[in-house]
Amino acid sequence: MWHDVRTLNTTTNALLGVLVLSLLASGIWWVAQRPMFTLKTIRIEGVGETILRHVNASTVRTTAVPRIKGNFFTANLDTVRTAFEAVPWVRKASVRREWPNKLIVTVEEHEPLGTWGEEGKLLSVKGDVFTANLAEAEEDHELAEFGGPEGSEKEVVARYRELQAWFKPASLAPEGVWLSGRYAWSVKLNNGMTVELGREASSATLKDRVDRLVKIYPQLVTRLQDRIESVDMRYPNGLALKATGLKFGIEGKKK
């Protein structure tokens, strides 16, 4: 081997290459550890022109910052993102570096639509269940009430939007929507009336039932004023109605 010049040259070059790479890696590590690359600023901004309303410096300091390790080069951006997504009100976060010692975190906040279930949780306009301060959520508008089986959140929000449109001709609006464990729908309206809509036999079932109620509603109001407590629309050709001091129905098999 020692008389094989070609092999010796190849081995020498390989060792020199390893040495150079080792020195380069050591140099990069040394530079990366310089104080100038210690993270000094974490800037939080909303998506686009959105102004953040609920995510504040105090919450970030106590919830996210303690979980951020490393400097400009070594901080794991996925870990930083996860830390910010654990902050109350944060729906989604993205992180990027800005030379030489700054992280920019873009945050999308939850927009509350109502409460979910009986555990004090909130439901966003996008159908996400989250936990946050209820008083803060009620600052802009009164929250609707929602409930349903686990995994039905987005379906309930979509149904709420449909019910808003369906009841609008009668100048009524839903204030609460619930989907039972048997997948039957009920809605509370802004006049205090609760409406049982039942299960969907077809894609048109609930819309047809709401349309029947909207059509007859002016007559009911004329006769009963604001005494109506609940209406059961789970009948093919009628309804059952409960009002203060009165209860009656139109016969028909309930569905």
Image (spheres, helix red, strand yellow):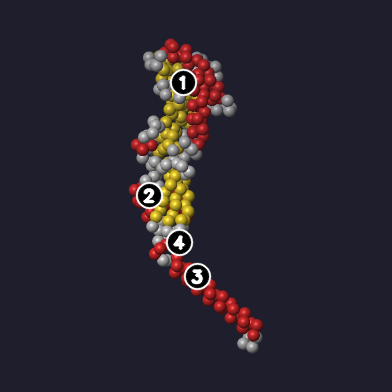
At which x and y percent is residue 22?
Answer: 51, 73
Dot 4 or dot 2: first in sequence order is: 2
Mark 1 vs 3, N-terminal side: 3
Q: Does residue 171 appear left or right of residue 16 in this picture?
A: left
For label 1, the SS is loop
User: Mark 1–mark 3 contact, CB under 8 Å?
Assistant: no
Q: Which residue in the structure is indicated by mark 3?
A: 25
Q: Earlier in the sequence, mark 2 or mark 1?
A: 2
Task: Tell me the kind of residue under disc 4.
Answer: Thr
The quarter of the image holding the N terminus is bottom right
Residue 91 visible somewhere in the drawing:
no
- Residue at numbered disc 1: 171
In percent of width and height, residue 162 lies at 52, 28
Q: Helix, strand or loop at disc 3?
A: helix
Q: Residue furthest top?
A: 223
Q: Who comes first in sequence, dot 4 or dot 1?
A: 4
> With respect to residue 57, does 247 lie above or below?
above
Q: Is residue 73 above or below residue 178?
A: below
Mark pair 4, 1: CA separation:
58 Å
- Residue bearing the label numbered 4: 74
